[in-house]
Amino acid sequence: MRNNSKHKPTRVLIALPGLHRVARGAEAALESIGRHLALRENFAVTMVGSGQPRDDDPYQFIHAGCVPRERFERWPRVPVLRNEYAWEELTFIPSLMRAYNPADFDVTIGCSYPFVNWALRARRTAPHRPACIYITENGDWPAYFRGREYRFFHCDGLVCTNPEYFARNSQRWPCTLIPNGVNPRTFSPAPGSGDRQQFGLRKDGPVVLMVSALIESKFVPDGLRAAAAIPDARMLVAGDGPLRQQVDETGHQLFPGGRYRRLTLPRERMPQLYRSADVLLHMSRNESFGNIYLEALACGLPVVAHDCELTRWMMADCGELADTTDIAAVSAALKRALQNDSPEQAARRRRLVETRFDWDVVVEQYASFIQNVLYARKLNA
């Protein structure tokens, strides 16, 4: 491992099926956590996922194959296997178990349930019992639901990514409240670097951007309807998922003449995408966190999002919040965001990210929580 400490480093395993294969959401967050922990001299990090190793990462990466979630979009939804993500996770477990020796690690970190959580807690016989930390990247439901498969959930430490989760779980689990982060040196305004033509858009007219998985809970078609009220708007959707056909049909109908585009991009091109837009719209009403909010704000981009405890906590007064069940209210928020934007407001968004959400700041909190969990386990051993 890349570690120069004279003391034995804390050995961390981070596991998620989509690591190094999926470049958004929980995968992007866990990769960033692993990268920044590995750069600290007192941590040695191993990541396990279905992607491939990269030469420039400071952690060890182990490929563990699985069947991609897209293959399961039409498979039956049954208890435990409730969606395509659960099916993908199940196929990941044989490879994960071959790669995972509990004696090699002090702590494991995951954010998917049930199968990865169960696998990381399996074979935990004394004296080699790594602590188990669970991050609520995909929701906190395993931590507080008591029935069905959820009654088998356990962790030694719970990282809550928003205040609602922390309030709901702090009496039951050793908890901490840690937001996700962003690298403000990668996601930056960089004036002049946004090129709409590279994304198939003309230079005239405001560009409304949605970055989202195309699933029911994201309400992307409703976002298209709200944006259609903006005169001469051009709609850019970055994402994929089971609703791709419905989203594309709605987009082409509401934004004729080549004003609608949908694409998928590697993560390294996302800063250019934000810089090519005029406003980010996200319709989801129940997010665990929302990494895209930070990425857009770091690029100076106005954000229109659902008005809830999470978005108020994250964005303070730097976002245009509306009830996204009301399409007219979302349209009005988009108009305000486009009409009232200024360099001073963009700079204020940027300062919010730099002071609260820089990964260097966030991972310091992770490092402290990991050590606290390990110390508590030692006291209770």
Image (cartoon, grey):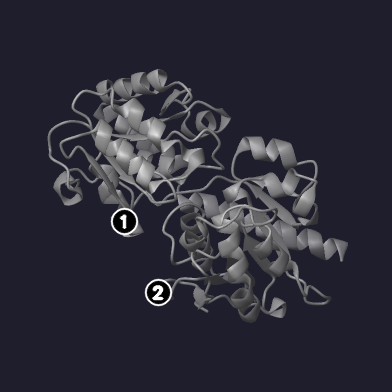
Where's residue 84, x and y in %?
A: 55, 56
- The secondary element bearing badge 2 is classed as loop
- In the figure, residue 161 lies in which quadrant? top right
Residue named by callout 2: 54
Q: Is residue 369 left or right of residue 291?
A: right
Q: In this view, does 381 lie to the left or right of 30?
A: right
Mark 2 or 1: the one toward you: 1
Residue named by callout 1: 265
Where's residue 373, x and y in %?
A: 73, 58
Where's residue 115, x and y in %?
A: 67, 63
Label 2 sits on what residue type? Arg
Up-down relation of residue 321 to residue 202 (above or below):
above
Label 1 sits on what residue type? Leu
Quarter placement of the C terminus: bottom right
- Whichever of callouts 2 and 1 sits on the residue coming sooner in the sequence is 2
- In the figure, residue 281 lies in which quadrant? top left
Whether residue 69 is visible here, answered yes or no, is: yes
Numbered label attached to residue 46: none
- Residue drawn at (22%, 43%), measured in percent from left and top? 276
Q: How far apart are marks 2 and 1 (CA)?
A: 18 Å
Verify CB contact (< 8 Å) between mark 2 and mark 1.
no
- The secondary element bearing badge 1 is classed as loop
Front one among 364 and 306: 306
Up-down relation of residue 280 to residue 197 (above or below):
above
Q: Is residue 198 left or right of residue 304?
A: left
- Residue drawn at (48%, 48%), measured in percent from left and top? 181
**Counting other residues with Cα less than 10 Å from the Cα at mark 1, is it few (<14), some (14-19), or many (20 or more)?**
few
